[in-house]
Image: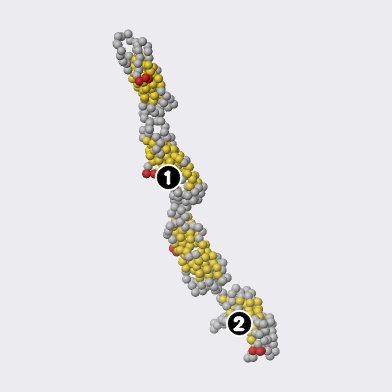
Amino acid sequence: MTFWPIACPDHCHCIHSSSGTIESTVNYVAALGADTIRGITDASPYTYALSGLSSVTAAVVSSAAMDGGNGGWPLLYGANPLTPTALSLAINEDQLNDAERNHTTEQVAYVVFEQIRDTPGVTIQPTGGSTDVGEGGPTDTYNVVLETEPTADVTINVSGDGQVTGAPVSLTFTAVNWETAQSVTVSAVDDDVAEGNHTGSISHTATSSDPAYDGISVAGVHANITDNDNAGVTISPSGGSTDVTEDGVTDDYTVVLTSKPTANVTITVGGDSQVSGSPTALTFTPIDWLTAQTVTVSAVDDDVDEGNHTGTLTHSAASGDGSYDGISISSVQANITDNDTAGVVIAISGGSTDVSEDGATDNYTVVLTSKPTANVTVVVSGKGQVTGAPTPLIFTAGNWDAAQVVTVSAVDDGSIEGNHTGELSHSVTSSDGN
């Protein structure tokens, strides 16, 4: 047992019964115990209760009295004779005969010392003053070290929050290495979610048989994270372009998200008067966001002579994930091969038109080959020998494919011409450029 000195060449201390502090480095408890301590063989040890100490460093004990001629001296006795709450003693006889190692009760004076420890603590030291990491790299480190020597091993547990991790996940400090800093490597969790630059936290807990360190508060580490994910929607036309025909040849393209959403994302596909897309809505979830979905593009067979032209499919997004709700999405332009040609078809009844100046008439029909974008007027004009009626003929977007009949009559001109021919001509006017 080590005894703490209470005097030195420069200082002398008088310790009174009670408690106190010596030069801010040692606490003590001193008292004259009760007349209850007996010999080693008398069912020892005997104890005095202590209070006011959190740890003990040393003790001094002394006999305070002697019962008759039965002298002896007190001993710290037992497997663990000195604790912060109890002083275990026995009286050892001043005789050599073991048979005399019993004793009547004695009083023992004692002083118990506690060395004042520095304030325990755990220091966290980020390298460079901050902790900066990125999804997919780079990593960063910080150091952990104890501020005082522990009386038992101290384990510091390292826990991430889902955004960052720390390795190793536990650090052990002993009475030998407590002042040697240990390093923790911080890594960002590469989570596929577009969060922008954000933060994560690492927390620490301490466990130890040293009560000063067990459960001691340890500061956390705040990490700045650079994200490597961007919310977006990728449109990929098959073959590099989208080509359809009004005769029914379709094409397709795929749609996929560029990052994992935090809620379902619905992409609505909208066509125009020239093309349509199917399906009209695509739903991506946090599970299938990386699986491309296909949209089939069809041309609208509209009967209008437009020549080879284009149509456009647009997209809009709705989601409970703010990064995807209303996000801008590219449109798809489809190249359309038309199957309509502007024209006027004249159909002769019976294969020929035969009339006479005596009044016999004949007819033919007139019809358009494609739907006009504006009214089409066909004027029928005779050239002196025949006439056609009615004239003009009006074709609209509503009746363009309904044939109209023109009745042909010969002009009875009183001239002897023999059987002869006449001609009807047609002129077309419209604001439809075709």
Horizontal side of 428 relative to 57 (left or right) equals left
Instruction: Residue at 39% x, 25% y: name it.
Output: 368
Q: Residues within 10 Å of mark 2 (few under 14, many from 20)?
A: some
Residue 160, how many percent across, how many down? 50, 60
Estimate the spatial distance between the alpha carbons at disc 2 and disc 1, rounded to whole Å.
88 Å
**Marks 2 and 1 in Cβ contact (< 8 Å):** no
Q: Earlier in the sequence, mark 2 or mark 1?
A: 2
The amino acid marked with disc number 1 is: Thr
Disc 2 marks which residue?
60
Name the element at disc 1. Answer: strand
Instruction: Residue at 49% x, 74% y: name it.
Output: 176
Label ID, residue 254 = 1
Q: Residue 199 versus residue 318: which sits nearer the camera?
A: 318
The amino acid marked with disc number 2 is: Val
Name the element at disc 2. Answer: strand
- Name the mark nearer the viewer: 2 or 1: 1
Residue 139, how many percent across, how many down? 44, 61
Pick the quarter of the image with the C terminus: top left
